[in-house]
């Protein structure tokens, strides 16, 4: 007769990082906000078994920790502890891609801008995010498929444009994000038609930020597309502050680079930092100089010399020249063969090489044509001693090139240089307010925004670009398995919230590490030290955690969890996350 041991069953479900994600979702009141903003479903038939906001929360959790296509999320959820979704087994069994699609339809109909703004506001309040320095950057999101039916009023247009993923064959939209310098927290996002130029969006974005923050007393930092007369005047005329890069196409840039050829730059200040690539290498040096001549609009121009950029500029130029010469030598050996017999064919091939290798300013290619005598039999037949010949000629094309040594020397003197432009005076006032009242009492400390301080603010700009890296490599925004543009817009709004939650997790741990004097945590493989934990590393720490339930004759006998390591417990404590979903008691420090 079969004993009780033959009726034993072990049910193992994933816990993973869901308790961590749930903690931050509740902290910024995402469930309540979704319930408030999603449209009521009156007149749409019977109410679904699972509320749309619950469906979107399942999707949101997946975006943060797994990023699976819609048709696989139901299976993923059913493999986890159902309590973590605040749903039942029966609820999760009804999840399919159609349910998620209908929920995204509702999210599109909602006031998404108001919904996202409310979530950001809750995050700013709950985690005391400083909004005095905001950085903007854009990227493109590409889509496979035709997407020809885009007549739905109000949607962004997926179309071809300047693709930052180097996929000009795909349709795209422009995704803009603004982040606070206080922990890279995203505080604004925007979607624009795929062929929108970046210089056309900054006024709208700045107005949104001003309305959200409640005043214009914040510093707006962006790339060189901000540097148009319209954009800068729009911000400056409303007492806003900006820092951006002066483009190479501006007259002021060329004038200064010409001046450098005959003059030594009287640097205002120098700053040395450890080499970020290798601490054993020479230090990373910055020098700043404020130009005595302002921009044509009257704004300050700060010139910066960056030692790493100077080395990169020199190496890039050398590689362009070397690669171009190598390709020209190969082309030279092919002249006279197929498609390389005429002057035009050789000229076009040489020009293509110089353009592709970005060596046009450094190398000048010359095509010479020489008439070479050629003799041909006057009549057909086997040639003999008395065979008459006719004298003729044919073109012989030769290729030569020379390096533009003068231009190379000219450019070498400007290696590592780039100009910043700002409307902030040294005392913190803007150009407009300064011109209205140029007295000592209208500003603060005269050196509050010195040239070096302007550079330090701008240097945070690459951090916002890391949000795009998170968007495409961690949350994996592409590819998008959706056919309707409306659903794509709704999904991208949810992806932005997932991005917000991820950055809050990493910011909170870094702040707590600093507060407790913890320089690094052994979060890397082989317990290597990590000084700046990312959300991805933090969440992966709990990826394998599971809960197990032992059933005997269909009766629950025992529940137990995978043991938390000391590091996992420490990180939970630093994040303030309740460890009970992992089967551990809550300590006093976590209450």
Image (cartoon, rainbow, N blue to C red):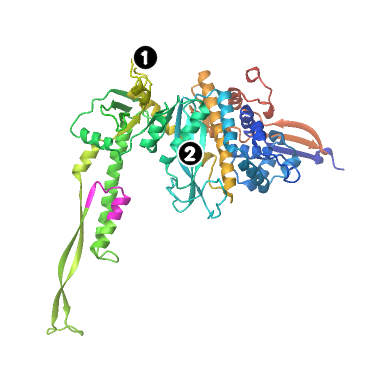
Foreground residue among 471 and 77: 471
Residue under label 1: 441
Q: Residue at x 77, y 31 (%)?
A: 558
Q: Residue at x 55, y 46 (%)?
A: 155
The spot of residue 567 in percent (x, y) is 58, 26
Q: In terms of secondary structure, where does tag 2 sit? A: strand
- Residue 15 is at least partly visible in this image: no
- Residue 454 is at least partly visible in this image: yes
The quarter of the image holding the N terminus is top right
The spot of residue 44 in percent (x, y) is 72, 45
The quarter of the image holding the C terminus is top right
Q: Residue furthest front?
A: 436
Q: Residue at x 19, y 30 (%)?
A: 263
Q: Is 589 positioned to the left or the right of 47 in the image?
A: left
Q: Earlier in the sequence, mark 2 or mark 1?
A: 2
Residue under label 2: 176
Q: Quadrant of residue 448?
A: top left
Q: Residue furthest right?
A: 1
The spot of residue 454 in percent (x, y) is 36, 26
Report the span colored magenta: 351-364
Q: Quadrant of residue 438?
A: top left
| Tag 2 and tag 1, C-beta contact below 8 Å | no
Q: Is 150 positioned to the left or the right of 300 in the image?
A: right
The spot of residue 506 in percent (x, y) is 53, 29
Foreground residue among 362 and 578: 362
Q: Is residue 127 above or below residue 88?
A: above
Q: Is 31 positioned to the left or the right of 228 in the image?
A: right
Marks 2 and 1, Cα distance to the nearest angstrom? Answer: 38 Å
Residue 297 on the magenta segment: no
């Amino acid at each position: 007769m079969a004993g009780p041991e033959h009726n034993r069953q072990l049910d193992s479900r994933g816990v993973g990082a869901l308790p961590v994600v749930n903690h931050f979702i509740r902290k910024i009141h995402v469930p309540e906000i979704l319930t408030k903003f999603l449209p009521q479903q009156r007149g749409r038939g019977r109410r679904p078994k699972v509320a749309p906001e619950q469906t979107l929360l399942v999707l949101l959790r997946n975006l943060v920790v797994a990023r699976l296509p819609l048709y696989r999320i139901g299976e993923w959820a059913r493999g986890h502890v159902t309590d973590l979704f605040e749903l039942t087994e029966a609820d999760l069994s009804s999840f399919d891609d159609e349910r998620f699609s209908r929920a995204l339809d509702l999210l599109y109909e909602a006031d998404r801008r108001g919904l996202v703004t409310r979530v950001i506001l809750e995050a700013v309040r709950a985690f005391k995010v400083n909004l005095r320095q905001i950085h903007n950057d854009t990227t493109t999101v590409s889509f496979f498929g035709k997407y020809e039916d885009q007549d739905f009023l109000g949607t962004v247009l997926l179309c071809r444009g300047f693709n930052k993923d180097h996929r000009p064959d795909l349709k795209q939209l422009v995704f803009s994000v603004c982040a606070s310098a206080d922990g890279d927290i995203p505080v604004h996002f925007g979607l624009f038609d795929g062929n929108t130029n970046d210089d056309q969006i900054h006024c709208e974005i700045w107005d949104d930020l001003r309305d959200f923050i409640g005043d214009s007393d914040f510093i707006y930092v962006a790339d060189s597309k901000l540097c148009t007369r319209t954009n800068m005047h729009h911000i400056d005329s409303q007492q806003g502050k900006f820092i951006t890069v002066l483009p190479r196409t501006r007259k002021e840039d060329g004038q200064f680079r010409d001046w450098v050829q005959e003059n030594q730059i009287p640097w205002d200040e120098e700053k040395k930092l450890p080499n970020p690539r290798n601490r054993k290498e020479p230090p990373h040096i910055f020098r700043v100089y404020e130009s005595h001549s302002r921009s044509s609009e009257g704004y300050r121009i700060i010139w910066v010399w960056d030692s790493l950029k100077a080395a990169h500029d020199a190496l890039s130029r050398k590689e362009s020249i070397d690669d171009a010469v190598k390709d020209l030598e190969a082309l030279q050996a092919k002249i006279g063969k197929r498609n390389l017999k005429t002057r035009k064919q050789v000229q076009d091939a040489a020009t293509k090489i110089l353009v592709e290798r970005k060596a046009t300013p450094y190398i000048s290619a010359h095509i010479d044509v020489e008439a070479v005598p050629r003799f041909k039999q006057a009549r057909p037949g086997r040639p003999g001693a008395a065979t008459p010949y006719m004298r003729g000629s044919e073109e012989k094309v030769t290729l030569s090139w020379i390096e533009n040594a003068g231009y190379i020397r000219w450019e070498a003197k400007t290696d590592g240089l780039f100009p910043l432009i700002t409307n902030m005076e040294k005392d913190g006032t803007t150009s407009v307010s300064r011109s209205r009242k140029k007295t000592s009492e209208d500003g603060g400390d005269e050196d509050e925004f010195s040239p070096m301080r302007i550079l330090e603010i701008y240097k945070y700009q690459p951090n916002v670009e890391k949000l795009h890296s998170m968007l495409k490599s961690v949350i994996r925004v592409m590819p998008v398995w959706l056919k309707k543009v409306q659903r794509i817009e709704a999904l991208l709004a949810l992806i932005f919230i997932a991005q917000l939650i991820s950055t809050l997790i990493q910011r909170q741990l870094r702040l707590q590490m600093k507060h407790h004097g913890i320089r690094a945590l052994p979060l890397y493989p082989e317990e290597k030290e990590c000084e700046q934990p990312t959300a991805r590393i933090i969440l992966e720490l709990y990826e394998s955690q599971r809960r197990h339930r032992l059933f005997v004759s269909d009766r629950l006998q025992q529940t137990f969890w995978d043991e938390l390591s000391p590091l996992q417990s420490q990180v939970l404590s630093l994040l303030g996350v309740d460890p009970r979903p992992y089967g551990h008691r809550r300590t006093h420090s976590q209450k």
